[in-house]
Amino acid sequence: DAQKLFELVQEGHQAWSCPLAMVIVTVLLLLELGPCILVGMASMFLLVPLVQKVVRTMMTIRKRRVKETDERVEITSAMLRGIKFTKLNHYEEKF
């Protein structure tokens, strides 16, 4: 799917840049504000597994929604094909 490839290219670099940015910001804040910043940074790092679980749950729900949307689109397309067939062959007077 082209959209997924686009998203991978657009957001794929975050796999390496986000952890690097977190470390750099931690060091800079530590130099500027002192050891009190470690509490906030530790809580941020400890929330990473929770965020991963939430994202996994959201992806599961999204996959389920995509299946249901595909079914709905297929049913709607079949109905529209039937209407088109009926109109093109002038069958509406018989119904």
Image (cartoon, helix red, strand yellow):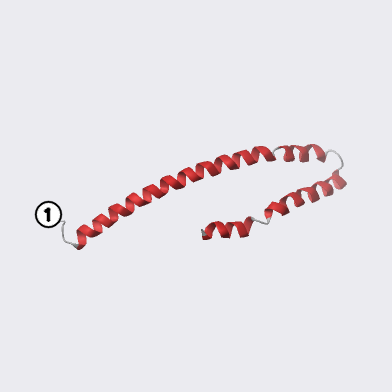
Q: Residue lying at the far bottom in this picture: please name it.
A: 88
Amino acid carrying mark 1 in the image: Lys
Q: Is residue 31 left or right of residue 85?
A: right
> Residue placed farthest to the left in the image?
94
Location of residue 57 in the rendering, given as x and y in whole percent from the top left corner: 56, 39
The count of marks equals: 1
Q: Is residue 61 above or below residue 74?
A: above
User: In the displayed structure, would residue 53 be above or below residue 69?
Assistant: above
Q: Is residue 85 left or right of residue 64?
A: left
Point out residue 10 in the picture as x, y percentages from the top left corner: 62, 59
Residue 56 occupies which quadrant of the picture? top right
* Element assignment for label 1: loop
Residue at the extreme front of the image, as rendered: 1
Q: Left or right: 85 with respect to 57? A: left
Residue 19 vs residue 26, the one in the foreground? 19
- Quickly name the residue at label 1: 94
Give me the residue at 62% from left, 38% from top.
53
Above or below for 70 versus 57: below
Taking the spot 25% from the left edge, 59% from the top edge, the residue there is: 84
**Is the residue marked by circle 1 packed among few (<14), some (14-19), or many (20+) residues within 10 Å?**
few
Q: Residue at x 55, y 42 (%)?
A: 58
Q: Please name the residue shown 46% across and 47% down the image.
A: 66
Rendering coords of residue 72 (x, y %)? 37, 48
Task: Please state the horizontal and vertical placement of residue 14, each as a whole percent of the image.
Answer: 68, 54
